[in-house]
Amino acid sequence: MREADYAALAQFRYQLRTFLAFSEAAAQNAGLTPQQHQALLAIKGLADPNGASVGDIAGFLLIRHHTAVELVDRMAKLKLISREADPEDARRVLVKLTAKGEQKLRSLSRIHLDELSAAAPALGKILRSFLAKVR
């Protein structure tokens, strides 16, 4: 390891933490917890037209199934998501965004993309230094 490698790793972690701090504050300003924002993004990002299962959400958020169930319950009470039985397997529950959930996610996603665009030059430089190390 070179000193430059440690510096690049430190800067990479700093950039990640800066983005996460921004993201958490943005979610809270929108009236959501960071985990609720992540769940909205997971449901939309999984891109299954039938919805996402609670297990899918748990896997995407790296949380236990029962924790995802509690999260889904809270989000349904806030009318951010709706639940329905899976048409192919009635034992599974599928979750979809409501209009309110879609609006919150759209608003948050716009400002997140702006933030990532601002951070892209620094992140790109760091990632290029990692690629140079691999080659």
Image (cartoon, grey):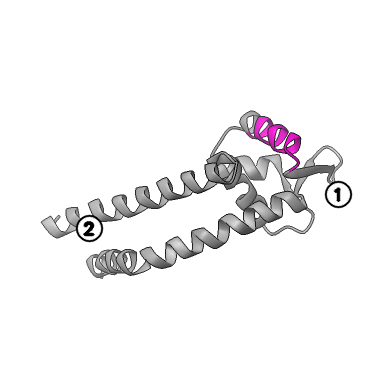
Q: Main secondary structure of the magenta part?
A: helix
Q: Comparing marks 1 and 2, which lies closer to the viewer?
A: 2
| Marker disc for residue 8 | 2
Secondary structure under tag 2 reads helix
Q: Tell me if residue 107 is in the magenta stretch.
A: no
From the viewer's perspective, is 85 left or right of 103? right
Q: How many marks?
A: 2
From the viewer's perspective, is 34 left or right of 92? left
Figure quadrant of the C terminus: bottom left
Q: Residues within 10 Å of mark 2 (few under 14, many from 20)?
A: some
From the viewer's perspective, is 110 left or right of 88? left
**Location of residue 123 by image quarter:** bottom left
Q: Is residue 43 above or below residue 114?
A: above
Q: Is residue 42 above or below residue 127?
A: above
Q: Tell me if residue 75 is in the magenta stretch.
A: yes
Q: Earlier in the sequence, mark 1 or mark 2?
A: 2
**Residue at horizontal 62%, vertical 30%?**
67
Which residue is nearer to you in this view: 20 or 46? 20
Figure quadrant of the N terminus: bottom left
Residue 7, position as x, y percentages in the image: 18, 55
What range is drawn magenta here?
68-79
Residue 38, position as x, y percentages in the image: 57, 46
Residue 51 in sight here: no
| Marker disc for residue 88 | 1
- Identify residue type, mark 2: Ala
Q: Is residue 119 above or below residue 34?
A: below
**Residue at horizontal 79%, vertical 40%?**
93
Taking the view exactly as shown, the residue that stands out farthest to the front is 29
Q: Residues within 10 Å of mark 1 (few under 14, many from 20)?
A: few
